Amino acid sequence: MKRTRHTFRLRPELADRLTAFAARKRVSQAAVVEAALVAFLSPDGPERFEAAFARRLDRMTKQLDKLGYHVEVGNETLALFVLTWLTSNPSLPPDELPAAQAQAKKRFSAFVAALARRMETDQRLAPEHKAVRHPDKI
């Protein structure tokens, strides 16, 4: 196939990226530039880019919806627990309050330490494969 020679200049950082990309893909730099020009000058290029961009946005929207659902489940779980705890535990007499507060501080410190350990080791009560399913998927 006959080819026409072109000479052009690139910024050094762009030239470095071109060199690295061509080496990584094991193709010539000319082939990379030619493919990029074909894609850029193609009449359906913007539509393909827009379609790919729309697919990525849709995927991100679904991920955010799933994340929002899980946050809502966590919030509702905590609220239900607190409500149940508050209704099932009687108030303490004033003379027992300082001892109970001291005990609560110890327990809270132990709770925070246990939570930190679980988060550092990636240990979860409900692993991703056993997580609560979204209502749309049940």
Image: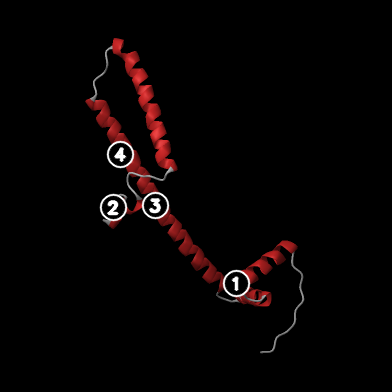
The amino acid on which the numbered mark 2 sits, given as a three-letter code, is Pro
Disc on the earlier residue, 2 or 1: 1
Q: State the mark number for residue 135.
A: 2
Q: CA distance from mark 4 to mark 2?
A: 16 Å
Q: State the mark number for residue 25.
A: 1
Q: CA distance from mark 2 to mark 3?
A: 12 Å
Disc on the earlier residue, 4 or 1: 1
Instruction: Find numbered disc 2 in the image and state the secondary structure of the residue it sits on.
Output: helix
Please name which of the two marks, 3 or 4, marks the residue nearer to the observer.
4
The amino acid on which the numbered mark 1 sits, given as a three-letter code, is Lys
Q: Position of residue 16 (x, y in %)?
A: 70, 65
Instruction: Find numbered disc 1 in the image and state the secondary structure of the residue it sits on.
Output: helix
The amino acid on which the numbered mark 4 sits, given as a three-letter code, is Thr
* Disc 3 residue crowd, few under 14, some 14–19, many 20+, Cα 10 Å: few
Q: Is residue 88 above or below residue 68?
A: above
Furthest residue in direction top, as rendered: 95
Q: CA distance from mark 2 to mark 1?
A: 43 Å
Q: CA distance from mark 4 to mark 1?
A: 49 Å
Name the residue at 35% across, 26% down. 107
Judging by the rendered image, the residue that carries numbered circle 4 is: 77
Name the residue at 30% across, 51% down. 130
Q: Position of residue 54 (x, y in %)?
A: 48, 63
Placement of the C terminus among the 4 image quadrants: bottom left
Q: CA distance from mark 3 to mark 1?
A: 36 Å
Q: Is residue 67 above or below residue 87?
A: below
Q: Position of residue 97 (x, y in %)?
A: 32, 14
Q: State the mark number for residue 65.
A: 3
